[in-house]
Amino acid sequence: MIFDYFKNITFGQPQFFYLLVLIPVLIIWKIFRGRTQQAAINISSVRGLQNISSWKNAFHHIPFVFRLLTITCIIFALARPQTRNDEQNTEGEGLDIILCIDVSGSMTAQDFSPNRMEAAKKVAADFVDRRITDRIGIVIFSGESFTQCPLTTDYAVLKSQIEQIRNGLLEDGTAIGSGLATSVDRLRTSTAKSKVIILLTDGINNSGLIDPSTAKEIAKRFNVKVYTIGVGTEGYAPTPVNTPMGIVMQNEKVAIDEKLLTAIANETGGRYYRAKDNRSLENIYSEIDKLEKSKVQIIKFTRFAEKFYPFVFAALLFLFLEVLLRFTVFKRFP
């Protein structure tokens, strides 16, 4: 218990601990004084007193021990034991960011570890951890689009929603236009200085009610910058496929509309990236994180709470016990 107390304690004036050198000095003085002190009565022989013992003689050092404890507690009190509490206020201009993530069946392909979707979820969660004052939301899409989480600064809720993303939540397909349009709609009324969409997909637009070119023009109209990421290796990727015999692994051709994704990014002021493995996907999010920096001011406060009172009370207690014993039980008579 006492170790837990000192684990959170710092000392405001630790130079007073140099006074602890008084403790061994007093002990040495006590020993030397005891050896040189003369007896009050001279006797010719102590043979008859050799077998006489007294509990007072055995415990006559106790008042001196209390004196040492008193001095030690006073030194600890002078060193100003205290607890430290650091507080931090973050102020600044944050961005509004939508993470637009493809959840179509092809995102279960295992050319990433363990698959594309889980890799995308991990880097998205890591990206959230690196932001401080931004509002972030999530839009998912496959054959249709859906707002998984509106813009928020509650990053715990946001990461929980990222964790819940999985294949099969929406009609299958790849509706890039719908996903982009829904993301822009979430930013339409935003008053943030910068509005950003990070759109991640592994396919070609083949469904949805909104054409990707139309969604791109809407993004330009509302000054939304779009970073696009094409996910998938070159050639073929092992993909779990439902068959009458159950789920089997098949090599599916990787087809990404890089021309479309490049046009969306370039015309909105963003950039197109191609991720072929987990490491490159992590590097892409790290680069976007560096490109889209918020203006942040961090103000730190440090509060100290004084904890010397227990040592003062302990010193008074030990002093009282020393005086009490010295003038009662161990009182000397001339």
Image (tube, grey):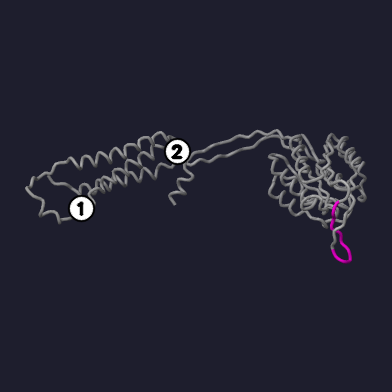
Residue with the mark numbered 1: 56
How many neighbours does mark 1 have within 10 angstroms: few (below 14), some (14-19), or many (20 or more)? Answer: few
C-alpha gap between disc 1 and disc 2:
39 Å
Asked which secondary structure carries label 2, the reply is strand
How many neighbours does mark 2 have within 10 angstroms: few (below 14), some (14-19), or many (20 or more)? Answer: many
Left or right of residue 221: residue 317: left
Q: Which residue is drawn at 77% across and 46% down?
A: 278
| Residue 241 forms part of the magenta stretch | yes
Tags 1 and 2 in contact by the CB under 8 Å rule? no
| Residue 334 forms part of the magenta stretch | no
Mark 1 / mark 2, whichever is N-terminal: 2
Residue 40's quadrant in the figure?
top left
Q: Which residue is drawn at 89% across and 48% down?
A: 235
Name the spot of residue 7 as percent of width and height, x first: 48, 45
Name the spot of residue 179 as percent of width and height, x first: 85, 47
Residue with the mark numbered 2: 11
Name the spot of residue 274 as percent of width and height, x first: 83, 41
Residue segment shown in magenta: 237-246
Q: How many marks?
A: 2
Q: Residue at x 21, y 40 (%)?
A: 33
Comparing 254 with 173, the one in front is 254
| Amino acid type shown at disc 1 | Lys
Name the spot of residue 307 as percent of width and height, x first: 43, 42
